[in-house]
Amino acid sequence: LRCAWCHNPESYLGEKQMRYQPGKCVECHRCERVCPKGVYVEKKRRINAEKCIRCGACVEECLYGALDLVGQEYGVEELVQILLRDKPYYDNSGGGVTLSGGEVLMQSSFAGELAKRLKEEGIHVAVDTAGNVPFSCLENVIPYTDLFLYDIKMMDRDLHKKYTGVSNDLILENAKKLLDLGVNMEIRVPVIQGINDTEENMRKMLAWIQGYGNVTGIRLLPYHDLGMDKAESMGIRMRRFTAPSGERMRMLETIIDLRDSKREGGQKDAEK
């Protein structure tokens, strides 16, 4: 997806990306002298993303932390050992590990292997996904996932395509397949003023999940602009939106009524 309000634009590519923070730059030009591709050709060290090969030479040369590479490669076992350092915290809090992104299922085989190892260690696993992937990607993680955190932006197909670049057909289809399998799912909705913060959108969503007791809740997440600075630092242009007012959020939460949704879900599970 290319959500217009994305807060993780550094995850667009399945590889490392260069980030430049102008506030830390003293224009010493050391980066220019070591760059093999002549990337730094614009004022204030703006990076020509098309020419940059992300070799990291400039990062090593920068004395002030104005440049860094976003992203790091791990093997499954290496990452498991890092995550196990916090196992006492997971055990004491009742929490666990959430696999997220961007879209974590762009690396679904790796995610499945990682989730399997975490389950072998007795750790609760959640998968945060927008669902815009072949269902086979979901199948890689289903056996080892305790909870799906499923992003549904809006129910209107045309609006969804306008603001994310794709329709919501595959996303909703995959969500229904997951729910029909009986997996636990929390629906997460980023709420943007003037776009999807409508009573109609929320009521359509409620109607769409009607009868599914394995929907543990609908969590409304007000828009924030934390992705703007990250996007700018990597030469990505993004539009700024507005968060709904507290009053508007309370109105929408009243429509969703999370407590009743959870209570109804529990009753339906008991009836089954």
Image: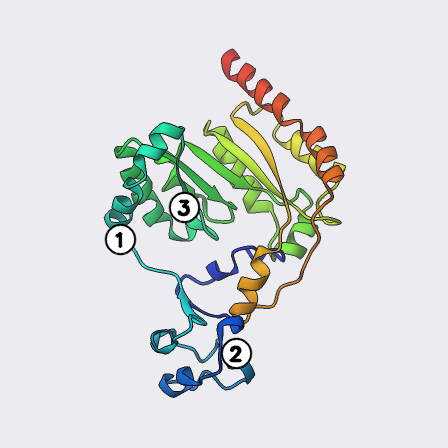
Query: Do the CB atoms of the residues marked 3 and 1 lie less than 8 Å apart?
Result: no
Q: Amino acid at mark 3?
A: Cys
Q: Mark 1 sits on what residue?
A: 75
Q: Amino acid at mark 2?
A: Arg
Q: Mark 3 sits on what residue?
A: 137
Please tell me which of labels 3 and 1 falls first in the chain: 1
Q: Quadrant of residue 91?
A: top left
Query: In the rendered view, how is the structure colored?
Result: rainbow
Helix or strand or loop: what does disc 3 sit on?
helix
Marks 3 and 1, how far apart at CA: 19 Å
Q: Mark 2 sits on what residue?
A: 46
Look at the image and tell me in which quarter the N terminus lies: bottom right
Picture coordinates of residue 183 (x, y %)?
45, 30
| Residue shown at the point (25%, 45%) measured from the top left | 81
Picture coordinates of residue 19 (x, y %)?
46, 69
Comparing 159 with 227, the one in front is 227
Helix or strand or loop: what does disc 2 sit on?
loop
Indicate left or right for 169 with 84 as reference: right
Marks 2 and 3, how far apart at CA: 37 Å
Picture coordinates of residue 41 (x, y %)?
50, 86
Height in image: 138 above or below 48? above
Q: Evaluate whether residue 32 shows in this view.
A: yes
Helix or strand or loop: what does disc 1 sit on?
loop
| Residue shown at the point (72%, 43%) measured from the top left | 197
Sort mark 2 into few (<14), some (14-19) or many (20+) by Cα contacts within 10 Å.
Answer: some
Please tell me which of labels 2 and 3 falls first in the chain: 2
Q: Amino acid at mark 1?
A: Gly
User: How many discs appear?
Assistant: 3
Q: Quadrant of residue 244?
A: top right
Marks 2 and 1, how far apart at CA: 33 Å
Q: Residue furthest top?
A: 271
